[in-house]
Image (spheres, rainbow, N blue to C red):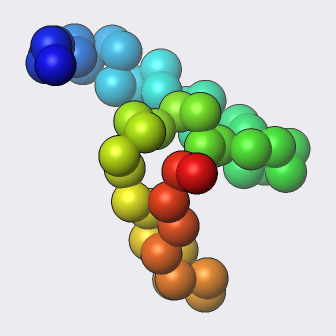
């Protein structure tokens, strides 16, 4: 598996896209790695299936 470092601009772009999708009620799952676990305070942990 190849690991690549993201630039600050790439991280910023993904962060902004995350909030845009959340505001529109769209899925954010494809913004994360297949092995990522995300924690939502009101919903608990979520995994990409």
Q: Which residue is painted at 48% across and 75% down in the image?
A: 45
Q: Is residue 45 left or right of residue 3?
A: right
Q: In the rendering, at what x and y percent does residue 1 appear?
A: 16, 19
Q: In the rendering, at what x and y percent does residue 40 appear?
A: 52, 74
Q: In the rendering, at what x and y percent does residue 14 appear?
A: 48, 27
Q: Which residue is painted at 39% across and 60% down in the image?
A: 37
Residue closest to the eye, 5 or 36: 36
Q: How many marks?
A: 0
Q: Is residue 46 left or right of residue 37?
A: right
Q: Which residue is painted at 58% across and 51% down in the image?
A: 49
Residue closest to the eye, 33 or 41: 33
Q: Quadrant of residue 4?
A: top left
Let me know if residue 41 appears in the view: yes
Up-down relation of residue 21 to residue 14 (above or below) = below
Up-down relation of residue 4 to residue 37 (above or below) = above
Let me know if residue 15 appears in the view: no
Q: In the rendering, at what x and y percent does residue 10 appear?
A: 36, 15
Residue closest to the eye, 10 or 2: 2
Residue closest to the eye, 9 or 39: 39
């Amino acid at each position: 598996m190849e690991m690549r470092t993201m630039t600050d601009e790439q991280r910023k772009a993904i962060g902004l896209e995350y909030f845009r999708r959340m505001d529109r009620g769209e899925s954010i799952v494809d913004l994360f790695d297949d092995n990522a676990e995300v924690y939502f305070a009101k919903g608990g942990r979520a995994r990409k299936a």
